[in-house]
Image (cartoon, rainbow, N blue to C red):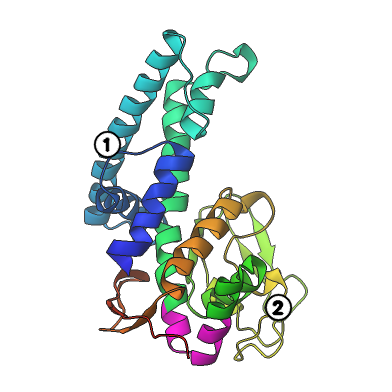
């Protein structure tokens, strides 16, 4: 489910929407996982994790540089650069007041890929894995997928991802002095440079903020989970990700399958989740 479905879907999003096609999906995921691990899961600054990320940035950046150069050459010869993220960014380079410098263009592309590719793949595997443990919810998801009820299907998948989120914590460095929980018994003042680890997965089960948190419900408001964030830090790829996760799950929900082994993770990331496809049963 991870390598043959989830990573393939995420890789095709990168190819068709962002415009970064060519490397095998497993190669692209390896690059973005290494970078994401250093950004999100390396609070102690482990040098080995950091060096793996530096190497991945060099490889992925070199690859995107080549693709940008190819698009720029197309544009110079009068051909269309393509209606995807790379094509639009290259087109903007000829607009004086919107011009994007080369280094910034590379940063934007790498940032989009790291923020989108691996989380999409993880969400597909984690949502389906959670549904396999909940036969009732799995049947609701199957029925919604079969009926073309995208909103209904997403409601099931989103609640599944509240129980099995792709990120359980978020680590950040405090940029300025700030008082958390001001006026409460939990009040604490953070100083600039302090590392803050936010347990977003735990917050999704806080009984003071989430009604009946231990039960699987489909009518929850969006703020009961932290899947895409909020405000200025909300996920830029939210709507693309929703479509990709939903369609990736549909591909398996339309089949008969059973679990063929345990879901294995590296940290919070799913790395293996074998399922066996079964012959479709005849109607009646």
203 left or right of 64 in image: right
Is residue 139 rendered magenta in the image? Answer: yes
SS category of the residue bearing label 1: helix
240 left or right of 16 in image: right
Disc count in the image?
A: 2
For residue 238, which quarter of the picture? bottom right
Q: Which mark is residue 58?
A: 1
Which sits in the foreground, 39 or 274? 274
Q: Is residue 133 visible?
A: yes
Give the answer, above or below, for where 196 lies relative to 232: below
Disc 2 target residue: 220
Which range of residues does the magenta coloring cover? 129-140
Whole-percent x and y of residue 244? 50, 57
Residue at 69%, 83% (x, y): give it: 210
Whole-percent x and y of residue 59? 25, 38
Report how far apart the C-alphas of labels 2 and 1 lie in the structure: 42 Å
Whole-percent x and y of residue 212? 68, 91
Quadrant including the N terminus: bottom left
């Amino acid at each position: 489910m991870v390598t043959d479905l989830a990573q393939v879907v995420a890789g095709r999003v990168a190819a068709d929407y962002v415009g970064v096609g060519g490397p095998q999906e497993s190669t692209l995921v390896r690059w973005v996982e290494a970078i994401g691990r250093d950004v999100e899961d390396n609070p102690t600054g482990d040098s080995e994790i950091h060096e793996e990320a530096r190497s991945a940035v060099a490889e992925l950046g070199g690859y995107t540089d080549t693709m940008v150069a190819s698009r720029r050459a197309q544009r110079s010869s009068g051909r269309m650069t393509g209606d995807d993220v790379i094509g639009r960014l290259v087109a903007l380079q000829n607009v004086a007041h919107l011009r994007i410098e080369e280094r910034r263009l590379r940063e934007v592309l790498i940032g989009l890929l790291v923020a989108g590719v691996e989380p999409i793949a993880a969400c597909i595997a984690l949502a389906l894995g959670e549904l396999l443990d909940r036969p009732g919810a799995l049947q609701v998801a199957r029925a919604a997928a079969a009926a073309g009820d995208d909103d209904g299907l997403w409601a099931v998948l989103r609640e599944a991802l509240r129980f099995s989120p792709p990120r359980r914590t978020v680590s950040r460095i405090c940029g300025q002095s700030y008082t958390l929980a001001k006026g409460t018994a939990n009040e604490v003042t953070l100083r600039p440079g302090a590392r803050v680890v936010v347990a977003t997965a735990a917050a999704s089960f806080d009984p003071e903020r989430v009604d009946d948190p231990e039960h699987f419900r489909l009518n929850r408001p969006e703020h009961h989970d932290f899947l895409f964030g909020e405000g200025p830090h909300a996920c830029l790829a939210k709507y693309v990700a929703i479509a990709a996760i939903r369609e990736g799950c549909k591909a398996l929900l339309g089949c008969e399958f059973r679990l063929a082994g345990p879901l294995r993770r590296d940290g919070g990331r799913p790395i293996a989740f074998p399922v066996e496809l079964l012959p479709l049963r005849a109607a009646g």
